[in-house]
Image (spheres, helix red, strand yellow):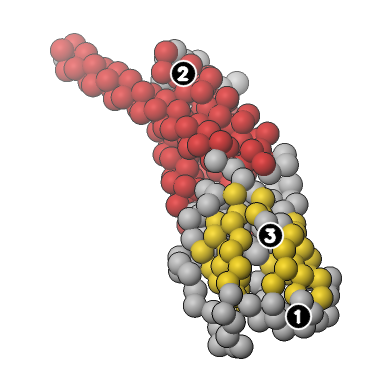
Amino acid sequence: MSLTTSTIEGSHRSLATALRLVGAALLLTTGAIHLDLYLTGYRHIPTIGTLFLLQVLTSAVLGLATLTLARRVVALMGAGFALSTLVGYVLSLWFGLFGFHEVRTSAGAAAAAVELAAFATLGAYALFLVPRPFLATERVEVAVRRAFGPLGALAVLVLVASLANAHASSNSSATPPSSGPSSASTMKVTIKNFLFAPATFSVSPGESIVVTNVDSAAHTFTSVPGATARGTFDSGTIAPGKSVTVVAPMTAGSYPFYCSIHNFMTGTLTVK
Ligand SMILES: [Cu+2]
């Protein structure tokens, strides 16, 4: 009898340790992904850049604490933090956050999947494998445990729906110019570090403009709505590492443009 009990307790304990260590590794991984995104461009986005840095620091602290301390409260904080990062991502996809509207990228989806897994492993560890001490009262404890499964399932559904609904970054490289007056010359614009280079330039009417995005974030090259009645252009979403060709308006004049994802990225195109 006592042998069976101790075997069960032994396997229970090793499962608990395995979940805690995996959860810690997942937390550190989301921090690493956010650090990479921060360094390769998100640091230029107002407010969001700061939040990314806070996410990196918090993931590191909670990840290392979970790794070294077998404490229930630490694991619960890790699970809650992973879930809140996920909520922030989903909000930025649906509604935008602090003026930043996220588009679907593989790095974003990967970070979200890791956050979901961190929430699941650390939550399971804290709620089911380390029974004491109770959260406040036994009634609260039971309610939180019952809510955990449905909350996880809801998070999966919301994430899948958000990614399916989100404006995907374009996969096409170098869309051929739409049929229009052909032009011998081609203007090249590069987007790097959330800046258009050049940001101010002149083209001939109907000239092709090849816009290349070398950032790790998606961007657009879009005429500012309402700024001019003479003509509009919009590259659509340009995925990281991709180029899209846009045809310049036919009427001479000055055309302010911006990135419709990051409105602070601006420039002016002159047709003459
Ligand atoms: Cu942009």
In primary-sequence order, the first of circles 2 and 3 is 2
Q: Nearer the viewer, mark 2 or mark 1?
A: 1
User: Foreground residue, 9 or 257?
Assistant: 257
Beta carbon at label 3 within 8 Å of ligand 1: yes
User: Foreground residue, 145 or 206?
Assistant: 206
Q: Is residue 118 left or right of residue 213?
A: left
Amino acid type, label 1: Gly
Q: Is residue 232 left or right of residue 108?
A: right
Can the viewer see residue 51?
yes
Q: How far is disc 2 from disc 3 in space, using C-alphas?
A: 38 Å
Q: Quadrant of residue 23?
A: top left
Q: Position of residue 223 (x, y in %)?
A: 73, 69
Q: Position of residue 13 (x, y in %)?
A: 30, 18
Local secondary structure at mark 2: helix
Amino acid type, label 3: Cys
Beta carbon at label 1 within 8 Å of ligand 1: no
User: Which mark, residue 64?
Assistant: 2
Which residue, given by chain and number where applicable, does mark 3 sit on?
259
Local secondary structure at mark 1: loop
Which residue, given by chain and number where applicable, does mark 1 sit on?
231
Amino acid type, label 2: Leu
